[in-house]
Image (tube, helix red, strand yellow):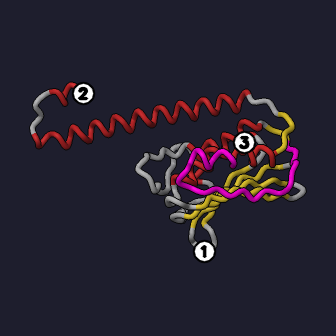
Amino acid sequence: DNLESEQVPASARAYLTRARQGSERLSAILIAMGAATRVEEAIGSAERVSFDLVAVLESAVAAYGGAFPGRGFRAELPPGPLDLSGAPDLIVQMLDKLIDNAVDFSPPGALITVRLRVDPQVAAIEVENPGPPLPELLPGRLFESLWQSRTGTDSQPHFGLGLYIVRLIAEFHGGEASAANLADGSGVRVSVRIPR
């Protein structure tokens, strides 16, 4: 800020702009890392309770239309209840990260689908969005801290922490997270499989 009040030669303005952008990016990274640390602490102190996964997902998906008016949301859920042992607040936080990711990597007006597939052993939460496919990569690499594979459709920076948090919450519930391109190449599906 002090440099901006000084007379800066035109040849140095580009460097000043890059330095300011770098500082802003570093600040955003530190804020995101602080949020990830808070989630890690919340996971460490979370208590397990019995809750209806279908009701939690229905409630969360109903709220996304208001939060993201530029996207449509569809819930494909079996009839409830579906009792699960875990932390419902963490499940909502995990779904929020999945939806944030789907919104960031889908075009305006896109329809994002939240699906729950159930079998006797596993409840699989899937978030599917149209958009650019994932590049060929090692399985699970997307879920590492601070790892990015693609740029979003918006101008917001992506720090590779959202899907890392998804993985942590899945693991707290004894599950796992994965991502794959849709068979027709039109988008991506991220799945979280949790034992019942």
- Most foreground residue, 165 or 58: 58
Asked if residue 24 shows in the view, the reply is: yes
Q: Which residue is mark 2?
A: 1
First in sequence: mark 3 or mark 1? 3
Q: Which residue is mark 1?
A: 184
Q: Residue at x 26, y 41 (%)?
A: 18
Quarter assignment of residue 151: bottom left
Q: Which residues are magenta?
A: 62-84
Q: Position of residue 167 (x, y in %)?
A: 66, 46
Name the disc covering residue 91, or none. 3
Mark 2–mark 1 Cα distance, whole angstroms, equals 49 Å
Quarter assignment of residue 46: top right
Task: Verify whether residue 75 appears in magenta.
Answer: yes
Name the disc covering residue 161, or none. none
Does dot 3 land on a helix, a strand or a loop? helix
Does dot 1 land on a helix, a strand or a loop? loop
Q: Residues within 10 Å of mark 1 (few under 14, many from 20)?
A: few
Mark 3–mark 1 Cα distance, whole angstroms, equals 29 Å
